[in-house]
Amino acid sequence: MSVLVIGIGHPYRRDDAVGLRVADRVADLGLGHVVVLHHHGEGTDLMARWRGYSAVVLVDATCGGGPAGEVRHWDDPATVPATCFPKGSHVFGVGEALALASVLGELPPRMRIIGIEGADFSAGEGMDDAVSQSVDAALILVINFISRK
């Protein structure tokens, strides 16, 4: 089974880096069947990257109005609110990629999307404490998903 974990974000946009941090934690586990990737979140490239994997996990910061650090996940891409993922400089982002891939029949056989609510997406380094503290909860969601057959 080939699994791809994609951490989405920008390291110099504060809370937007949380997906990258979760991906780094997965990489630190050294799981042989798991490929870990940092990604900027542009939708068409995401679709190309997950092609051929039997299971994919996307981890990204969200801006859906919840409390900072709130962790949500979806195993059905059709239920993901497209508006909760920040687009930054790319107009075609995570939500749009999921919708288009669904229409085209190009979603991976198994998929989990993990969103961590951010508070500050301004330029700079360092995350909100609540966002930083949510990394462990997101990591557990990744591990539980990739350990399922």
Image (spheres, helix red, strand yellow):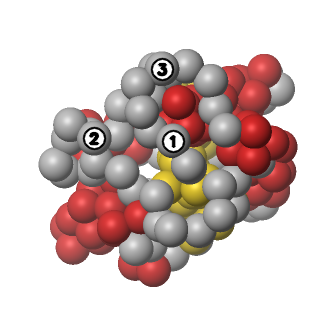
Toward the viewer: 141 or 49? 141
Mark carried by residue 120: 1
Can residue 4 be spotted in the picture? no
The type of residue carrying mark 3 is: Gly
Whole-percent x, y for residue 13 in the image = 45, 28
Residue drawn at x 40%, y 74% is 81
**Which amino acid lies under the numbered mark 2 shown in the image of this protein?**
Gly
Residue 73 position by quadrant: bottom right
Question: Looking at the image, is 54 positioned above or below residue 66?
Answer: above
Quarter of the figure that contains the N terminus: top right
Callout 3 secondary element? loop
Disc 2 to disc 1, how far (Cα)?
13 Å
Q: Earlier in the sequence, mark 2 or mark 3?
A: 2
Residue 59 screen position, x and y as percent: 56, 47
CA separation in Å, label 2 and label 3: 14 Å
Disc 2 target residue: 88
Marking on residue 124: 3
What element does badge 2 sit on?
A: loop
Q: Is residue 17 visible?
A: yes
- Distance between mark 3 and mark 1 Cα atoms: 10 Å
Horizontal side of residue 120 vs 136, given as left or right: left
**Residue at 41% in and 25% down:** 123
**As rendered, which of 136 and 66 lies closer to the eye?**
66
Circle nearer the viewer, 2 or 3: 3
> Label 1 crowding class (10 Å Cα cut-off): few <14, some 14-19, many 20+?
some
Where 145 falls versus 8 (above or below)? below
* 128 over 61 or under it: above or below: above
